[in-house]
Image (tube, helix red, strand yellow):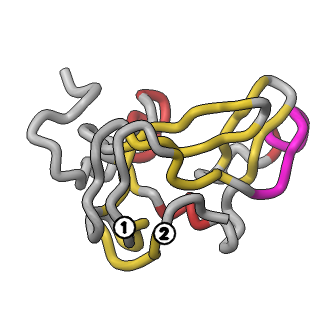
């Protein structure tokens, strides 16, 4: 259940998540939800790009369509970030976000190098992270 009003529509890289209201820096936007996997299950599902490791024994498989947070695209200069609170994953605004803006965050260097860099980063940032 989104905390802020958001909508899935065409974005930077296919479908994206967009704000339907102004969001203030520091606000929680949405929770990253899905089926909970233990270590063995997450190790077996490594090809799944929607895995979010909460700790070494708990991973969220966010590939389910009812997880609207899965539609948040990567950006080297995102306006949000993920935050783990009491074993749950939330997406929080790190900048003010205007109604109609796409919500995005940095997926991290490992994900970037494995999945984004081989296809080329399609975010609109002026400076791309992790490039040498």
Comes first in the chain, label 1 or label 2: 2
Q: Is residue 81 left or right of residue 128?
A: right
Q: Secondary structure at mark 1?
A: loop
Percent from the top left, x then y, of residue 67?
Answer: 65, 65
Percent from the top left, x then y, of residue 78?
Answer: 30, 43
Is residue 100 one of those drawn in magenta? no
User: Residue drawn at (75%, 46%), measured in percent from left and top?
Assistant: 60
User: Residue drawn at (25%, 60%), measured in percent from left and top?
Assistant: 98
Give the residue number, with chain letter if any, for mark 1: 21
- In the displayed structure, 97 sits above or below 57; it is below
Q: Which residues are magenta?
A: 34-42
Give the residue number, with chain letter if any, for mark 2: 5
Q: Where is residue 105, by image quadrant?
A: top left
Percent from the top left, x then y, of residue 47?
Answer: 66, 50
Given residues 28 and 75, the one toward you in this image is 28
User: Are discs 1 and 2 less than 8 Å apart at CB?
Assistant: yes
């Amino acid at each position: 259940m989104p905390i802020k009003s958001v909508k899935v529509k065409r974005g930077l890289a296919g479908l994206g998540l967009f704000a339907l209201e102004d969001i203030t820096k520091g606000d929680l936007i949405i929770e990253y939800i899905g089926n909970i996997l233990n270590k063995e299950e997450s190790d077996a599902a490594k090809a799944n790009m929607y895995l979010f490791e909460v700790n070494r024994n708990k991973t969220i498989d966010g590939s389910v369509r009812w997880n609207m947070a899965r539609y948040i695209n990567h950006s080297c200069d995102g306006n949000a970030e993920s935050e783990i609170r009491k074993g749950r994953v939330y997406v929080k605004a790190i900048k003010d976000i205007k109604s109609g803006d796409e919500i995005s965050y940095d997926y991290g260097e490992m994900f970037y190098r494995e999945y984004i860099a081989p296809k080329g980063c399609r975010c609109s940032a002026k400076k791309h992270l992790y490039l040498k």
